[in-house]
Image (cartoon, rainbow, N blue to C red):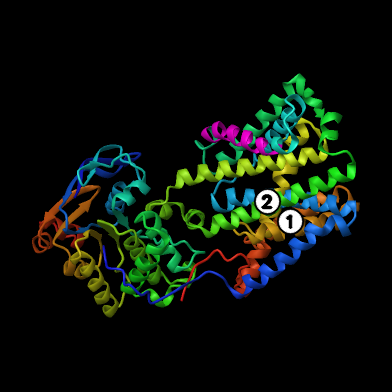
Amino acid sequence: MTSKIPESLPFSIVRSTFASKVAFLGFIVVFIAAVTLPWWGGRADMRLVVEFCYYLALAQLWNLLAGYGGLVSIGQQAFIGLGGYAFFMMAAFFDVPPLLAIFLSGVVTMLFAIPTAFLVFRLSGAYFAIGTWVVAEVYRLSFAQVSTLGGGSGMSLPISVVKSISASKLEREILIYFLALLLAMGVVTALYVLLRSSWGLALTAIRDSEAAAESLGVKKQMTKYAVYLFAAFGTGLCGAIIFLNKLRISPDSAFSVSDWTANIIFIVVIGGIGTLEGPIIGTLVFFILRGVLADFGAWYMIFLGIVAVVVMLKAPQGVWGLVAKRYGIQLFPVGRKLM
Amino acid sequence: MLELQHVNKRYGSLKVSDDLCLKVAEGHALGVLGPNGAGKSTMFNLITGDVKADSGCILFNGQDITRLAPNKRCRLGVGRSYQIPHPFSNMTVFENLLVGGIFGAEQSEKQAYSACYQVLDETGLLPKANVLAGSLTLLERKRLELARALATSPKLLLLDEIAGGLTDAECQQLIGTIKKIHDNGTTIVWIEHVVNALLAVVDSLIVLDFGQKVAEGEPGAVMNSREVKEIYMGIST
């Protein structure tokens, strides 16, 4: 049906809300506080924020996959490990400057994700989830076989490389701090821009009904591939930064399903899947619980499990889902209101 | 415009499309009747690609679309409404339409804004533009199905039971909307149990039963045919 478009439109499109404007100010405050932290905070604070940043980035990326793309992967540790190992190999064996090596680690990880996607995209639903896990295990076992990488016991970043990053330990920690901050801010900003664009409409449509999205012209399969590769790139970057921070890598720590996937799923589910706010809330909750329960040993994991089960039963939309429903607010204005 | 050639689809031993042949000319409005489980919605799913045909051929404007992905068929001009509404629950009604406007009709965001505004206006959904689709009533969701399909600017519009449960006044309004779409040159295939609504719009009728086409022709003649009487009234002559 074609109809003429009137010259002066009887409406306008509004994209921000009062809450989002307030939230934007809040983000600026947090941003300033974070950027200046090395000058007023201690080294322990910095280490905590570094960890917070990569968990946040990983949670956002997993949320993009599972919450929007419907790709419930439990094998993202494959890309953490690939990113980490790619970084160690480039820095230790090929003398690639560390910063460049981090970026290239993301690229290499994405290249590995192409054949991985080809394999796992033949599966769907629960089979996809298991398939991604199996692939990650295959990567773990493969890396354990490579003796130049230290086999199963792993390898350390050579002192010469560590020294080339910076002379003192403090300087290195500050550098890693800003890298992690950049990573988290970069991922959140990129996803925000993505979700505001028409890609966001397609992703949200796929999230709500794959069949209807496809019948309205959305290229579902291509969109899913793109999301998968983007998440692999970001996850690979995370992996590089995580193991630059740790200075040591081994197959078990690099391809750990509990560290890099179980915790991340916990964060996203608790916070609220399929929203940008959810993973932020979830990461905060995760760190608070971890801090409070740090002295209780194994009880900590048991308690996290109970919290996850209760949230899934009582509030499947997560903490943010409850808040958003109750008060109708949106901190990241990705919608379009017709006025 | 649309041609089905010997299209077959079976689930196990159940034939939901049995050697189905059909031709719909451009600008035509075709009504589809048949009891529940006759394969009416399956025929739509085969045309849109939601379900893949086992054998046979589906042509759209002379192009073989039998193996194309649903999104490709949409962009070629096949728009559909689902019998059971599939709204994007956490998006507003307006955003639901934008998906069709941007990806189905391949317009820029700006163009889609105006086009979707007009569709909202024509389908009476304008007051609901900023409401989340998940909070709509069933009738509103059916209207949204129609509006969303229109937002893709289809050349062929497939409507699957959108008149059920409407009051007389609402039904008249719906008939008016569909007539207008038809008058603009859009080809329509409409599955509907509300026969008087169907007869107010369509140029011809087909009747499906057990995946087969059992009657076809001018509406009056089909309604009076032996097949329709047998299926709908249990009269066997």
Quarter of the image with the C terminus of chain B in it = bottom left
Q: Which mark is residue A59?
A: 2
- For the residues labelled 2 and 1, the Cα–Cα distance comes to 8 Å
Say which residue appears at 26% left-offset and 76% top-offset: B173
Q: Quadrant of residue B205?
A: bottom left
Amino acid of disc 1:
Thr
Marks 1 and 2: in contact by CB < 8 Å?
yes
* Region of the chain picked out in magenta, as a range: A102-118
Q: Is residue B142 among what the camera can see?
A: no
Q: Residues within 10 Å of mark 2 (few under 14, many from 20)?
A: many
Q: Is residue A10 above or below residue B22?
A: below
The local secondary structure at tag 2 comes to helix
The one of A102 and B172 positioned closer to us in this rendering: A102
The one of A74 and A32 positioned closer to us in this rendering: A32
Residue A234 place in picture, x, y as percent: 64, 44
Say which residue appears at 27% left-offset and 53% top-offset: B40
Residue designated by label 1: A283
